Amino acid sequence: MTQFSLFPQGPLVLLDDFSGRMVYQDNVIAPDEAAAWHAHLLDSPIWRQQRRVMYERELDVPRLTAHFAADDPGLPWPLGEALAQACAATGASFNSIGLNLYRDEHDSVAMHNDRLGDLVDGCPIALISLGETRRMHIRSKKHLAPRRLDLDLAPGSLLLMSWETQTHYDHGIPKQTHPLGPRISLAFRTRKPA
């Protein structure tokens, strides 16, 4: 297991090999700006509670979600600014913004990879974090040598994952046992036309 510092100096290359590339960068969004975005989005009416069938029961997904097309004329502030900064920081172009609100330490997302069938081949995924710092687990899939990374996603940070990483790694945000405030994740993707 590799655990990375909360405050790395400059871009931190987590991996860069045949299995893909992951790069973490602190302070892509200035602290005051990240705090303003977080406060505004937290109080926004955009959030939805999804339900899924798990363990033969329908249960609430343990977080709130929202989704927007990048060209949506009703795109709420500050998502347009966040999109522009994600594109500038990564050199990529994104057409989809997915949001997750982890309300407290009880909210989470299980280990998973993004569904590649929904995404344009070769296009990366970028995650901007706002609010509380949360730990992300990144784990290699069974066909690779075991590799696990634990990464603290600080407010204003950006994690860039290449398309290839989704075939070789799972990632997730686990529940915590100590009190935590809300965290918002902005996920930028390039989706195939519907």
Image (cartoon, grey):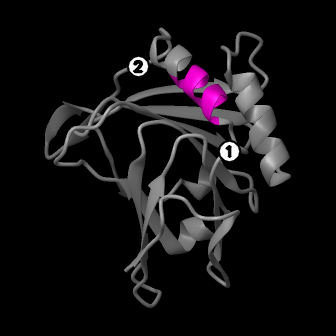
Q: Quadrant of the N terminus?
A: bottom left
* Rendered-image quadrant of the C terminus: top right
Residue named by callout 1: 189
Give how far across and how far down residue 188 sits, in percent. 66, 41
Q: Amino acid under label 1?
A: Arg
Q: Is residue 145 magenta?
A: no
The answer to whether residue 162 is left or right of residue 147 is: right
Q: Secondary structure at mark 1?
A: strand
Give the image quarter of residue 71. top right
The stretch drawn in magenta includes residue 32: yes
Prevailing SS of the magenta stretch: helix
- Specify the segment rendered in magenta: 31-38
Is residue 94 something one can see in this rendering?
Answer: no
**Relative to residue 133, is residue 7 depicted above or below?**
below
N-terminal label among 1 and 2: 2
What residue is shown at x 29% (from left), y 52% (from top)?
A: 174
Quadrant of res 172: bottom left
* Secondary structure found at label 2: loop
**Residue receiving disc 2:** 48
At x 75%, y 56%, the residue is: 123
Give the class, few, some or many, for how many residues have Cα within 10 Å of label 1's Cα (few <14, many ≥20). Answer: many
The type of residue carrying mark 2 is Arg
Residue 143 in the image: state x and y as whole percent. Answer: 45, 86
Measure the C-alpha gap from mark 1 to mark 2.
20 Å
